[in-house]
Amino acid sequence: MIDITQPIYVLTIAAFVIGLIRMGNPATARSGILWAGIAMAFSIGATFFVPGISNLILIFPAIIIGAAIGYVAARKVAIVNMPQMVAIYNGMGAGAASTIAAIELIRGNTSSFDTTIALAGAIIGNVSIAGSVIAFLKLQGWIRQRPITFSLQQVVNLITAAVGVFFGVVFLLHSNILIPYKSALVPFFVLTIGYGFMMALPIGGADMPVLISLYNAMTGIAVGLEGFAISNYAMVVAGILVGAAGTILTLAMATAMNRSVGAILAGGFGKAQVEDRTVSGNLKPISAEDVAVMLAYASTVAIAPGFGMASAQAQFKVRDLADMLIAREIKVFFAIHPVAGRMPGHMNVLLAEAGVPYDLLEDRDEANRAFQDVDISIVIGANDVVNPAARIQGTALYGMPILDVDKSKNVVVLKRGAGKGFAGIENDLFYMDKTKMLYGDAQDSISKIIQELKKL
Ligand code: NAP
């Protein structure tokens, strides 16, 4: 039988690359996802043409069950729960890479080089799957989001990782030190997976975006390495693409949150202090009617959306409000913080869904240059990303570059009550003299502002 898997893999790789390129622009991102899906279909399809393929009786049900679960989950998941879904799917990719490694290592008929590659992939995959599970549990609220710490944690983590790697080396060298070398795979897998769990536990919710994109990059690398180990070039290229894209995203997210990737890898992050500061001043409520009057007389309005806009599904009303203001010849822009919401690009996705033109979106640096000329900034369910406490040393948010909403002339904050942001700390912005609070669900509040604006 002629091996046609390689030509199919070439098509797979081409489709992955096209998908990735198209995902780079919000206007083509949707089709980019489709291309990536086509690439996955090609790569799975190629499996059936692998010479000497067996176990079809297991492969078919696995594909059907996996596809059915994936389809139902993707249709049902609320956009606010997307990060959990990304975390768990990422974990599955890492788990698949680790499983391939386990099978290859148990078979044991590989060269030392391939064994080293398989072991390296297994370590990365094991850490990534275990960490992704913790990220999922934290984001889902099934375990507490705050850092879970205990004394000598870093020492325990280091020893766990080192002993796990030691057993990997025992296996590689076929050394029967302590236990027969083949049995060394058991403590190797247990300890590296254990290290993955423990590495993620001390990391707090506010650091989650960096963690998830780091696992994403690690999964790509693990898949790429296992692709090498089993000479599957589609896996190698797909792994490299995910690893490279994930690494760039990790660096971008770390910069956005002022976290150093070096500190992350050393297990030094997630030590955000949970402080108990008292903020002076008081909260000043405002009515929708008064907000509408303020807006009617403004020349420039900035809209700073955050997680609350996603939670309230207020993006469509926000777009209506922006359209109304623009129709009144008021200059409007959206200030987008890279980690606003609960996943990278969360605000962009929602605003694109509502049809907000891309040229109204300003990234953080551009927005920060413009705030001083803004008459009113409307903060819609954002908290951490506009919290000036990030400029104060010793606070949990210290160092995270924020949207400088507090530099604008007036600020109106839409939120339901006294809820804190994701990092769980007070927001100085809300207590400033220039800030007014419009309480209520963001979608209701914007509807009311629109109604009042229509009367003016
Ligand atoms: P945030 O700090 O989570 O604050 C959201 C605010 O929205 C809360 O103060 C809440 O106050 C309000 N809110 C919730 N539901 C609302 C509703 N229906 N209507 C009106 N207001 C509502 O949000 P953020 O400023 O966007 O910051 C994002 C945070 O999440 C950052 O700390 C970031 O590091 C973290 N994070 C980001 C990602 C990512 O990739 N983007 C992933 C994971 C974590 P009330 O309860 O008083 O209404």
Image (tube, rainbow, N blue to C red):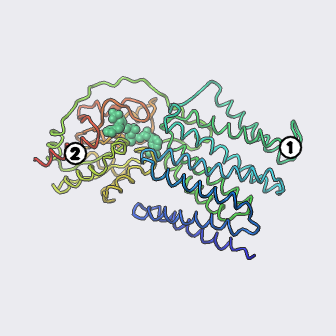
Tell whether 103 sits left or right of 141: right
Residue 384 in sight here: no
The amino acid type found where label 2 is placed reads Ser
Which image quadrant for residue 127?
Answer: top right
Residue 144 drawn at (x, y percent): 51, 31
Residue visible at 32% across and 45% down in the picture? 304
Q: Against 66, is 400 above or below?
A: above
Mark 2 and mark 1: Cα distance apart in space: 68 Å
Chain-order first, disc 2 or disc 1 = 1
Q: Which mark is residue 181?
A: 1
Does the beta carbon of the residue at mark 1 sit less than 8 Å from ligand 1?
no
Residue visible at 38% across and 31% down in the picture? 420
Circle 2 is placed at which residue position? Answer: 447
Residue 274 drawn at (x, y percent): 47, 27
> Which residue occupies the foreground of this view, 72 or 201?
72
The amino acid type found where label 1 is placed reads Tyr
